[in-house]
Every structure is written in C-alpha cells, then in structure tokens.
Amino acid sequence: MLEHYPSNKIIAGCDEAGRGCLAGPVLAAAVILPKDFTNTEINDSKVLSEKKRKLLRYIIEKDSIAYSIGVVSASEIDNINILNASFLAMHKAINKLK
C-alpha cells in the first residue's frame, strides 16, 4: 500500500473533524497502525453510520500502536481562525503520540 515510503519509517495518519461547524471545538486524531493492519471499512467517516464509526473507533484504538486526540477550543478558533485551528489540533494530536 505504501511501497514508496521507506520501510524503516513510522507513518502516522492524522485528520481533523469539526472544521465545518459554526460553533464548538475542532478536533484532530492521529494514529499509528501496525504495518500489517487492514480494514476495508476505514475510509471516509462522513459516509458511515454513528454505530459503524463507534465500532471502527474501538477497532482502531484496540489495534493501533499509538493514537491521540488534539483539541482546539472555540475561543482559540476565534483568535487564530479555523484553518490555523485545524493545523494546531493536528499538531497537538501528533505531538501527543507515544
């Protein structure tokens, strides 16, 4: 799947949620999955039911090498704008990975 990346590197996936909302925080998750991890249902959370998202969250948390969440509050968003808040949330999540 990721043949073009060096095999001796650890790759973390990261994405944000909440950027389209008019109120509330923006959150980001970062995850490192084992090299042999596969699950064809993990793709776009926006097309999944809430029940399926909860199940997949459990699977990701259980099987991951590491995962973390970064949060930027609504007041922080007001100060730095939504784009910068999204980047900040992703950096917070990545920096918390163990």
Image: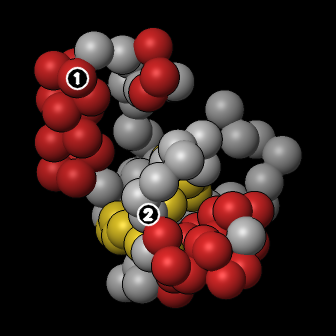
| Mark 2 burial class by Cα count in 10 Å: few <14, some 14-19, many 20+ | many
Residue type highlighted by circle 2: Pro
Of helix, strand and loop, which one carries label 1? helix
Q: Quadrant of residue 10?
A: bottom right
Q: Nearer the viewer, mark 2 or mark 1?
A: 2
Q: Is residue 19 left or right of residue 65?
A: right
Q: Is residue 74 left or right of residue 51?
A: right
The location of residue 20, given as percent across then percent down, is 60, 41
Q: Is residue 66 visible?
A: yes
| Mark 1 burial class by Cα count in 10 Å: few <14, some 14-19, many 20+ | few
The location of residue 60, given as percent across then percent down, is 28, 45
In this rendering, is residue 92 above or below 82? below
Q: Is the C terminus in the top left, top right, bottom left or bottom right quadrant?
A: bottom left
Q: Between residues 59 and 8, which one lies in front from this camera angle? A: 59
Q: Looking at the image, which residue is at 42% across and 58% down? A: 24
Q: Going from the N terminus, do you reach mark 2 or mark 1 first?
A: 2
Q: Is the N terminus in the top left, top right, bottom left or bottom right quadrant?
A: top right
Q: Quadrant of residue 37?
A: top left
**Which residue is disc 1 drawn over?**
50
**Which residue is disc 2 drawn over?**
25
In this rendering, is residue 38 above or below 85? above
Q: Is residue 21 left or right of residue 58?
A: right
The location of residue 81, given as percent across then percent down, is 73, 70
Q: Between residues 26 and 57, which one lies in front from this camera angle? A: 26
Label 2 to label 1, Cα distance in Å?
Answer: 19 Å
Residue type highlighted by circle 1: Glu
